[in-house]
């Protein structure tokens, strides 16, 4: 009997602590303390994911999350962070008119590493190849991405 009560109390405490942490994260986002938030997340070994952002969708303005994601890319430029920004704009919060120009920019600007380029192109081809009417990429962009991926596969096979 006491074990059940103790387990229920522990569960409730975890919920309260989780709510407090979310409130702290929200405050840091709203105050523009992106560096502090990222440091705290690194210490906790917590990644910035689409699920993490979705948890704050109704409590933090999309412009703040967009700004936070740009800060994340500025501090840790990687394919996964750029793709996270693109996914946020396309699937979670399309809060301004022409998001696809930002998606195009994030995919086509020079990647930090050849592997990042491969990941960016694979994501773009998955999302936009095959006649997607929202595609920000021209047919020549898509051909260039396919060719680049083929070249990368041939180089890695050598």
Image (cartoon, rainbow, N blue to C red):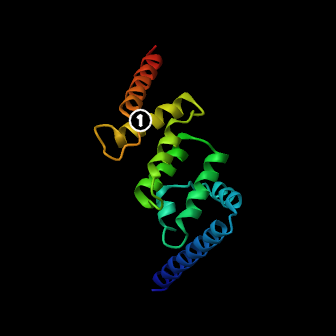
Q: Quadrant of residue 29?
A: bottom right
Q: Which residue ends up furthest to the top in the rendered image? A: 158
Q: Is residue 62 above or below residue 133?
A: below
Question: Looking at the image, which residue sits at the far front?
Answer: 97
Q: Position of residue 140 (x, y in %)?
A: 39, 28
Q: Which residue is tagged 1?
A: 122
- Residue at 65% x, 46% y is 74
Q: Position of residue 82 (x, y in %)?
A: 53, 45
Residue at the location (42% across, 22% down)? 153
Position of 64 relative to 110 (above/below): below
Decide if residue 111 is on the left or right side of residue 39.
Answer: left
Q: Residue at x 40, y 38 (%)?
A: 137
Q: Label 1 neighbourhood size at 10 Å, few (<14), some (14-19), many (20+)? A: some
Q: Which quadrant of the rendered structure holds the N terminus?
A: bottom left
Q: Secondary structure at mark 1?
A: helix
Does 42 sit left or right of 126 as displayed? right
Camera-side residue: 71 or 1? 71
Residue farthest to the left, as pictured: 130
The residue depicted at 47 percent of the width and 57 percent of the height is 50
Q: Position of residue 31 (x, y in %)?
A: 68, 69
Q: Position of residue 98 (x, y in %)?
A: 45, 53
Query: Is 142 displayed left or right of 101 in the figure?
Result: left
Q: How many marks?
A: 1
């Amino acid at each position: 009997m006491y074990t059940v009560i103790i387990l229920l109390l522990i569960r409730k405490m975890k919920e309260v602590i989780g709510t407090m942490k979310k409130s702290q994260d929200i405050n840091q986002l709203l105050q523009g303390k992106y560096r502090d938030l990222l440091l705290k997340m690194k210490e906790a070994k917590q990644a910035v994911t689409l699920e993490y952002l979705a948890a704050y969708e109704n409590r933090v303005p999309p412009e703040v999350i967009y700004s936070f994601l740009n800060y994340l890319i500025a501090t840790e430029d990687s394919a996964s962070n750029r793709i996270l920004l693109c996914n946020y704009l396309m699937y979670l919060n399309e809060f301004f008119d022409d998001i696809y120009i930002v998606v195009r920019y994030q995919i086509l600007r020079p990647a930090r590493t050849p592997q990042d380029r491969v990941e960016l192109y694979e994501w773009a081809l998955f999302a936009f190849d095959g006649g997607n009417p929202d595609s920000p990429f021209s047919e020549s962009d898509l051909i260039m991405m396919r060719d680049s991926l083929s070249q990368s596969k041939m180089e890695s096979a050598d």
